[in-house]
Amino acid sequence: MKRKVRHVARNGDRRDWDDIIGSPSPSSRPQPPSRAEAARRRAGSGAGGGVPAAPARRSVRGASEPAGASGARSVRAHASAASGRGGPGRKRSWPKRIGLAFVFTFLGVVIAGSAAFLYLYAQAKVPVPDEFALAQTTTVYYADGTTRMGSLSEVNRTIIDGSTLPDHVSKAVVASEDRTFYTNSGVDFKGILRALWTNITQGTRHGASTLTMQYVERYYVGDTFSYMGKIKEAILAIKISREQDKDQILANYLNTIYFGRGAYGIEAAAKAYFGKPAAQLSLSEAAMIAGIIPAPSAWDPAVDPEMAKERWQRVLDIMVEDGWISQKDAAAQTFPTTVDPATLTLMDFSGANGYLLQQVRSELIASGAFTDDQIDTGGLKIISTIDKARQEAAVAAANSMTQVEGWDPNTMHTAITSVNPANGEIVAEFGGVDFQKRQQNAATQDISQAGSTFKLFTLLANAEQGGSIYKTYDGNSPMHLPGDGGTIQNDGGYSWGRIDLVDAMKYSVNTAFVELNQEIGSEATKKAAIAAGIPEDTLGLDDTIGNVLGTAAPHNVDLAAAFATVAAGGQRTTPHIVREVIGPDGSKVFAATTTPTQAFTPEVVSMVMPALEAVTKAGGTAEELADFPFSTGGKTGTSSEQISAQFVGFVPELSTAVSMYQNDAQGNPVPLTNIGGMDQFHGGDWPVDVWMSYMGAIEGSLSVTDFSWYVEVEQERPAPQSDRPQSAPQTQPAPTQPTQPAPAQPAPQPAPTPDPGQSSGPTVPEPSEPEDPSQSANR
């Protein structure tokens, strides 16, 4: 019985529920029975033979009720009343239940959200930094390692150590972006709730990202716009705030974000706006940069100076409020003057510089040591071989041609390459007037027929076979080759009689060198050219008899390198424009190979030097160099029909090639005529002038006067011959078309070289008054 009573009491008791939603009103509670009712009940209970009444018990609500059916009904009635059925308390219970539901729902959301947040936090791992966030500017420097030439990167960023920044730079950014940065846990919860409420009530998006959250977004996860993305961003921000100190977070943030003007990171921004490193930013400059962070392109002072100044003032005011600076310091500031965006280094590829930068990239890619992506984003420091002063001199010398009457820079091109013979370093190079207008490098990509510069290789091949440069050969013109080999003419049509190779080189006598080439074998000339540095795959390079007259069309840089081999006493080194590459951590990650190959012995090179030096002496085709105060050798060259003209000259410290040529709108070669009032154009004309202009400008930087490797070599000396040609006829028959060369053996054509398989006819002097051959031979 006792257990039953407890059961009934438990099922009927509502006190716990009422404590939450409130007790029923007095009018709805069960009332104690009246006296009459109590008497009636007692009378009723006594009927039936005097069965004793059950002991009375207290009702659930405190009223004394008899046991039995009436007691059970009382319990049910009370339960009914408590549950709201009947009575005036029924309507008032619904708001309480709704409130309870809201409370429970809210608590459930909070608990579930907290559980989810804790789960995501436990699962979150700080990811690898985003590749773009780590991308740095790759910068190319001149040979001094400190003077900037330009940038190769798509991303303008230089990562710096945050400790190098003035304190006011960091504080200005904190004032602008996150005043609670040093005290928050990485997330501003009040700001988030405020932004969320605004988003819901106004239907617009308002951010509440802390500086740490911005850092996470830019450094790790990229841009995020969804609420779930923001939640993950907040979790990472909290985690990172616990794993990294504030200074590290701020430094990474400043190295990562975009500041406008193509500048990523504070270092690039300082240079873009003020032309100085970030370590030198003043308080005013720092406030300006910090103020425009939210919209740098729109608030750039060059775009919207009023907004930029307003943002600048806001940063200063906050810095005062937060105690970073005094009111006096703020009042002393004036709005800073920024760099004109038009002068920024975004124009690195304009002018002649663009050819150098592109060549640097191409060389590194060709080395196999770097990919384009590594160059674009690796933050490399590339030390080039280019000497700034010499480069400027080369550009000035080449551009001087634009002042020559008849010179059209749109179709006529000058190429210059100057190489250090000792290590193959290209110290100066002119590839064109403006890379942004023409992307073809005249020095390294264009080709032009070498002309008589190839006579050097026949001389070298002859010396290797023990031949003397003082041996004489037939210098008369024309020269008829056996069979259908064609006819060879000297420039001007002059005959020189028997002439040794020194004078034949000095006056560039074609017929004498063709006879020499026949004697030693034309394949030896080809072999010597390749050994000196002419690439084996050069267009037109063959072993036909005409190769001595320069039927091949190498690049300008190839000629400079080949003559550099001679200037180095026979040691060949591959020409290159990159000296070394330094990684972002300061370690050397690449160095050019400068180990030379002994292509010719010093004795062989010494044997041909007198002939090469004669070219630059009085009466030679490059006699303009006669007074140059250094031991100098070289060779002029003019292709058939004057489509191209060359001069390659060298001193102990430099080998420099100058090439000139012309192409029509379709890229086809066109003769160089009517330039500077001259009907004909030779290697001994403008190419020599440009070479001398360049070398004369840098003469003071040269110190070595003689070739240290030169040795005296005994060579057979026949009886001396006159260096004057035989008398030219006063009248000559009309020129006849030379015989076409046989298919298997294309013959060289007149002065000095036609395209193989073609003939341009012999060149003859004017019948009435022939020119002095010393002034006209292959000039």
Image (cartoon, rainbow, N blue to C red):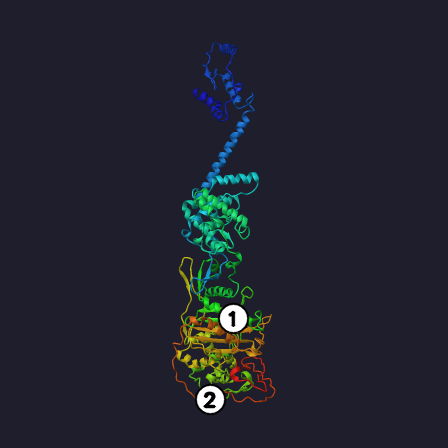
In the rendered image, is residue 537 in sight?
A: no
Estimate how packed mark 2 is, as few (under 14), some (14 to 19) or many (20 or more) residues with alpha carbons within 10 Å. Answer: some
In this picture, is 351 found above or below 554?
Answer: above
SS label for mark 1: helix
Q: Please state which of residues 621 and 370 is positioned toward the viewer in this rendering.
A: 621
Residue at image point 52% right, 62% down: 349
Q: Position of residue 383 (x, y in %)?
A: 43, 63
Q: Position of residue 590 (x, y in %)?
A: 42, 63
Measure the C-alpha gap from mark 1 to mark 2.
39 Å
Q: Please state which of residues 26 and 687 is positioned toward the viewer in this rendering.
A: 687
SS label for mark 2: loop
In the rendered image, is residue 583 in sight?
A: yes
Q: Amino acid at mark 1?
A: Ala
Residue that label 2 marks: 721
Asked which quadrant contains residue 585, the reply is bottom left
Q: Please state which of residues 231 and 579 is positioned toward the viewer in this rendering.
A: 579
Q: Position of residue 278 (x, y in %)?
A: 45, 53
Estimate how packed mark 1 is, as few (under 14), some (14 to 19) or many (20 or more) residues with alpha carbons within 10 Å. Answer: many
- The extreme right residue here reads 734
The circle on residue 296 is none
- Disc 1 versus disc 2: nearer the observer: 1
Q: Amino acid at mark 2?
A: Gln
Residue at image point 52% right, 49% down: 308
Total labels: the figure holds 2
Tell which circle, 1 or 2, labels the residue nearer the N-terminal end.
1
Q: Position of residue 778 (x, y in %)?
A: 52, 80
Residue that label 1 marks: 398
